[in-house]
Amino acid sequence: MAQPNLVEFAAPERAGAHDLIYVESMKHAQRAVGSAAICVIAAEGVALSGKTVLRSAQPKAAFVQAAELLLGRAPIASGIHATAIVAPLAHLAPEAGYRAVRRDW
């Protein structure tokens, strides 16, 4: 079997040969078998012929960890968004953190 050269992470139906996918149960095994992806993170007991299988008790969590390791974490945006409403006298403590929250009014 060829050695996988992972490039992206995708749902089984959208995955290419070099994408990593995951399957949590036999219920979704056919999606993985029918996928172009050759590498799958799967729970113990999920049979996936023709795939390189990485076993995990928690496939979804392992999938997220693999994405973080291979792609790195997205940088945290800094500054004030152009549409933010901020009081003129507002101050943020140097040790404080914040994240944007979108609200559709």
Image: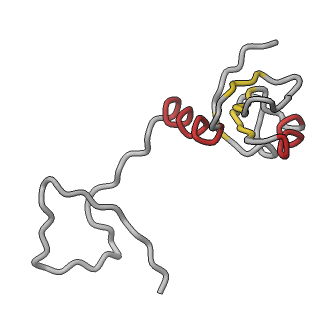
When asked about the image quadrant of residue 87, the answer is bottom left
Q: Residue at x 47, y 87 (%)?
A: 105
Q: What is the residue that sits farthest to the bottom in this orientation?
A: 105
Asked if 58 appears above or below 83 in the picture, the reply is: above
Q: Which residue is drawn at 73% across and 41% down?
A: 24
Q: Is residue 51 left or right of residue 18?
A: right
Q: Locate residue 37, reporting x and y percent.
A: 78, 32
Q: Residue at x 89, y 40 (%)?
A: 30
Figure coloring:
secondary structure
- Judge by depth and name the residue closer to the eye, 65 or 92: 65
Q: Is residue 42 left or right of residue 67?
A: right
- Judge by depth and name the residue closer to the eye, 88 or 21: 21
Q: Locate residue 65, reporting x and y percent.
A: 53, 35
Count of numbered circles in the view: 0
Q: Residue at x 83, y 34 (%)?
A: 36
Q: Locate residue 76, reporting x and y percent.
A: 35, 50
Q: Quadrant for the N terminus, please.
A: top right
Q: Locate residue 18, reporting x and y percent.
A: 72, 28
Asked if 67 appears above or below 28 in the picture, the reply is: above
Q: Is residue 61 left or right of residue 13?
A: left
